[in-house]
Amino acid sequence: MPRFTRKLMKIDILFALQYFLESLSDLVVHMETCKDDGRTRCEVRVAFPDTENTVVQLWWTNVPSRFANEFLWDSVTVACAERSLLNELLGQLANEGVELAHGHIAPTIGGEVDIPMYQYQPQRFRAVYPPARKVGQMALSGEKPANTMEALQAAMGLQTEAYNHNFTDRPLRFRIKTPQRAVSILAEASMFYGNFVAHGRQIFDIPPALADGFRRSDVEDIPLSAIKLPYESFFLHFGSQMDLETADGWHPDGAYVSMIGDPNGKHVIQFCLTSVPESQETYRNWDISPEPVFIQGVPSELMSIGVGEAVVRIFAEKTNELNAQIMGSKQGDLDQAVNEMRQDFDLPGEFVDVSSQNARTELESLQKKNHAWREMLNLVVNAIAYLSSYEDDVTAEWPAKTPANLLAQLNTGTPKQKQRARSKLAALGFTAIHLCGKRFVEQAQKNEGGESSSKKPTWVRGTWVWQAHGPQWSLRRLQWRMPYVRNKDGDTGEEVGHLYLVS
């Protein structure tokens, strides 16, 4: 839902008017879908919660419904203290046939939430998504360990409760467009958050220069069995990748990584790729604009093949599964069950099996965003390989806004004081961050510069290679052959040669 500039100028009035006219058009279409009998009407209601904001709401009234006789259709908060400008806007809406009326104003859901470390998905997810904190507590205490069916059922129950709490006061225009499957995936994502909490809330911050190097490096042939995870569960933060989009206005920014099962036996490495919107307000409204997350696992039987081939196989399996759901509609079984129930109950309307349509929608989204997810998985595996091979290029630091008194207790207090300070910091939304890539950034800066070239510079992609080491060179370890720019240092026609980051 838009929020207009503090000083509502003429152009802003026109923009607000256009927004409501589009909303009204959507409402008319919805009325036709609901077979409106012509007795319903639309009206605008206004409230002034404070001296700087005005809430303007579009209501659908006299609705022929068993549940309510009116619904909030749309709501906008306008930051404007000048009543004359607002009256001009309302007057133009009245000219379009919308009634101006007094009536119940639905409360604003969400609002400003202080998130000290908003840039990191685990911290904003915990602050905004109600079930996340409870799932984390249950995982940490062992009450319901993460990645169990019991924990997932609990998360789904918590989500349903939170969703229903917000549901009645949400604008109907957005409720009918909310992808229910996308909302339910948030409960699955909370399993990754719970596992993340249970293993110490480990966040690795990859700087932009290092992330850009990973984006230019191939990792498709590396088997996951060759990579050592620093923790059983952790989060990788890359920052918003603005050239990739996972939904309108959403850009991928990180990933949870979890290892489930016996590392020496049957196990799976799971990835939960996350995204961040361009507006914090969008993120706070999780129930009508759920974060697009993508969950993918690599089972132990695929650990020995290259990551690229493993991802292709898993993607093909997911596509086949959705195609089977599309072709296997249960409408016939549903019709038979409803007809049997009508003998004992008065069931109004028709009942439609939407599983096929939901599967089709999910498949279209998966195919459309496949490039973004593949790019992110490449980025994630590069980062894991880096952490596996360059452990000494990681330093732990607390954010600059961390409360000084708690940080002092954490550094110099008794064991009990340290534990208490750590718990308080976690409750406030603070955690230490593993900062990565200092050596890479320093080396990359040394390699920059040089004279301009008459030839167009081109990037040579990086790769990971097996370096011989140890007694009689009998052992192997991963080493990063960094990407570099060809023809950067002059018109010589020669390549500088690959630069290695020494482990």
Image (tube, rainbow, N blue to C red):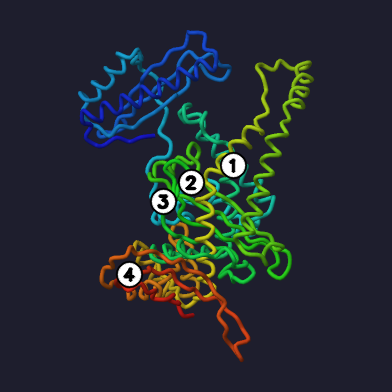
Closer to the chain start, of discs 2 and 4, is 2
**Circle 4 Cα neighbour tier, 10 Å, few/some/many (<14 / 14–19 / ≥20):** many
For residue 437, say whether it is visible: yes
| C-alpha separation, residue under disc 3 versus residue under disc 4 | 24 Å
Foreground disc of the pair 3, 2? 3
Residue 203: image tag: none
| Residue 308 figure quarter | bottom right
Q: Choose mark 2 or mark 4, whichever is in front.
A: 4
Q: Earlier in the sequence, mark 1 or mark 2?
A: 1
What residue sits 62% from the left and 64% below the top?
Answer: 306
Percent position of residue 228, x then y: 59, 71
Mark nearer the viewer, 1 or 2: 2
The residue labelled by disc 4 is 488
Q: Is residue 285 above or below residue 376?
A: above
The alpha-carbon separation of the residues under discs 4 and 1 comes to: 49 Å
Q: CA distance from mark 1 to mark 2?
A: 17 Å
